Image (cartoon, rainbow, N blue to C red):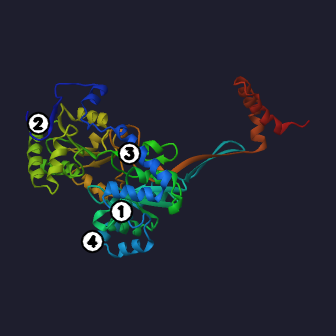
């Protein structure tokens, strides 16, 4: 079956295992390791030369040299005042909804009495300082400011810094809509810096800018940003190595092909490497979606980008025998965004294990999650949803156990501690307990 622009993967006659499905998954060939050498050089330059290095990198890589790297608070205030009213209203709605949804992610402290006088308290402590990266390449992303900053604030992080590349259009300043979104959130420590250099600045600090090192770096970026995050992981925490956006739609023959095609195109406009995948058990429906995709791509504002993404090896229409196989294929893929548009989405959901975020039914499009659903749009890509969550308050929290035994509770387990310490040939461990009861 020829479905024109998008490649077809027809597995109706197969009952593949999970391993076999993983081999059938369409993926872009993005090699983060290939960018490591360049990213490392940019980081080293920032470590050695600080602000002058960041200014030089902006001139070379962004095509403009900022007047200064650190944004003045007055610029942030002006940007808030200059927001288009409709945009400000949308940003404020997004902030309100993301805050509401994120509050549910903060666990309450819990105290467990193991035995009389023996208590373990589980508490969740926020990190002290985070660096938020907001990209500025093919588009402007004020929504990413919200999605990164709100979870940190809800978690209780006391110090939040933000970096976004210098913009030619604005004379080397950070995009004013980015500044306006940050201002609405009360963030005023902002830097006009981008790419791997910005990640290095967050990780190691820049004394000349009064930029202290951070504990965690979050936010998406290009392959050099991903490589830089990999290089500094361990020195600081990172959220993930975010790759190009992905959407996988599971649909049956009762879905609307126009809506499914619109959803595929909506994510394809992000990047030529964006992945758009339809999995369906209805061949005629697949053909209808392919026709609509062609039509929408032809009139899309970013038509060339959309067509390149949809025609790429990372995008496909997958035809399966039934919706159980569709769910299995999705689990093998582990999509960033999973849209289920079937007669009974909740029944398909019962078989879903791996996805960054899941959108049920025709009236929960992925675009809703990108902006004002209340969910977070910073999500794992490249199959990382098999083992990693999207961004949330928990990204910035560390679980800690507080141990509180009284004398009698410790006395009751002294013999067991001594026995285990001897078994491990670490007798001083047991002696440290026995010393508390030595009356000699």
- Measured Cα–Cα span from mark 1 to mark 3: 23 Å
From the viewer's perspective, is residue 202 above or below residue 117? below
> Considering only order in the chain, which callout, 1 or 4, is on the residue closer to the N terminus?
1
Label 4 element class: helix
Please tell me whether mark 2 or mark 4 is closer to you in this view: 4
Total numbered labels: 4
Q: Is residue 279 above or below residue 43?
A: above
Residue at image mark 3: 226
Labels 3, 2: front one? 3
Horizontal and vertical percent for residue 377?
Answer: 34, 53
Can you give x and y, in whole percent of width and height, for residue 340 in the image?
Answer: 24, 45
Give me the C-alpha separation between circle 4 and circle 1. 31 Å
Does the residue at mark 3 contact the one at mark 2 (Cβ under 8 Å)?
no
Front residue (pair 364, 208):
208
Label 1, on which residue?
65
The residue pinned by badge 2 equals 283
Up/down of 389 relative to 52, above or below: above
Quick check: 272 left or right of 59? left
């Amino acid at each position: 079956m020829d479905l024109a622009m998008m490649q077809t993967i027809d597995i109706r006659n197969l009952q593949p295992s999970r391993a076999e499905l993983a081999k059938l998954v369409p993926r872009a060939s993005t090699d983060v390791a290939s960018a490591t050498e360049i990213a490392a050089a940019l980081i080293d330059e920032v470590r050695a030369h600080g602000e002058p290095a960041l200014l030089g990198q902006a001139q070379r890589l962004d095509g403009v040299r900022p007047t200064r790297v650190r944004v003045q608070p007055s610029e942030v205030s002006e940007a808030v005042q200059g927001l288009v009213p409709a945009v400000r209203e949308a940003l404020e709605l997004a902030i309100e909804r993301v805050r509401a949804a994120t509050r549910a992610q903060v666990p309450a402290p819990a105290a467990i009495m193991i035995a009389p006088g023996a208590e373990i308290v589980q508490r969740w402590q926020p990190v002290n300082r985070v660096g938020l990266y907001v990209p500025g390449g093919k588009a402007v992303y004020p929504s990413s400011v919200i999605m990164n900053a709100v979870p940190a604030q809800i978690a209780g992080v006391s110090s939040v810094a933000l970096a976004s590349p210098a913009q030619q259009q604005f004379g080397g300043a950070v995009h004013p809509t980015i500044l306006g979104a940050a201002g609405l959130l009360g963030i005023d420590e902002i830097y006009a810096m981008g790419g791997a250099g910005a990640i290095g600045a967050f990780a190691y600090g820049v004394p000349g800018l009064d930029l202290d090192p951070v504990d965690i770096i979050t936010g998406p970026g290009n392959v050099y940003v991903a490589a830089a995050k990999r290089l500094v992981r361990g020195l600081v925490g990172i959220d993930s190595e975010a790759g190009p956006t992905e959407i996988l739609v599971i649909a049956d023959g009762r879905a609307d092909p126009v809506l499914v095609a619109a959803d595929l195109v909506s994510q394809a406009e992000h990047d030529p490497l964006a992945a758009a995948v339809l999995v369906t058990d209805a061949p005629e429906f697949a053909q209808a979606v392919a026709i609509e995709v062609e039509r929408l791509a032809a009139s899309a504002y970013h038509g060339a980008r959309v067509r390149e993404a949809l025609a790429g090896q990372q995008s496909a229409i997958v035809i399966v025998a039934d919706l159980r196989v569709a769910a299995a294929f999705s689990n093998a893929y582990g999509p960033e965004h999973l849209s289920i548009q079937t007669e009974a989405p909740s029944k398909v959901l019962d078989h879903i294990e791996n996805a960054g975020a899941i959108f049920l039914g025709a009236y929960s499009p992925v675009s809703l999650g990108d902006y004002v659903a209340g969910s977070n749009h910073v999500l794992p890509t490249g199959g990382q949803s098999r083992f990693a969550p999207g961004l949330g308050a928990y990204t910035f929290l560390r679980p800690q156990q507080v141990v509180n035994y009284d004398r009698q509770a410790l006395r009751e387990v002294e013999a067991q501690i001594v026995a285990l310490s001897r078994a491990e040939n670490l007798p001083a461990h047991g002696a440290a307990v026995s010393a508390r009861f030595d009356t000699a």
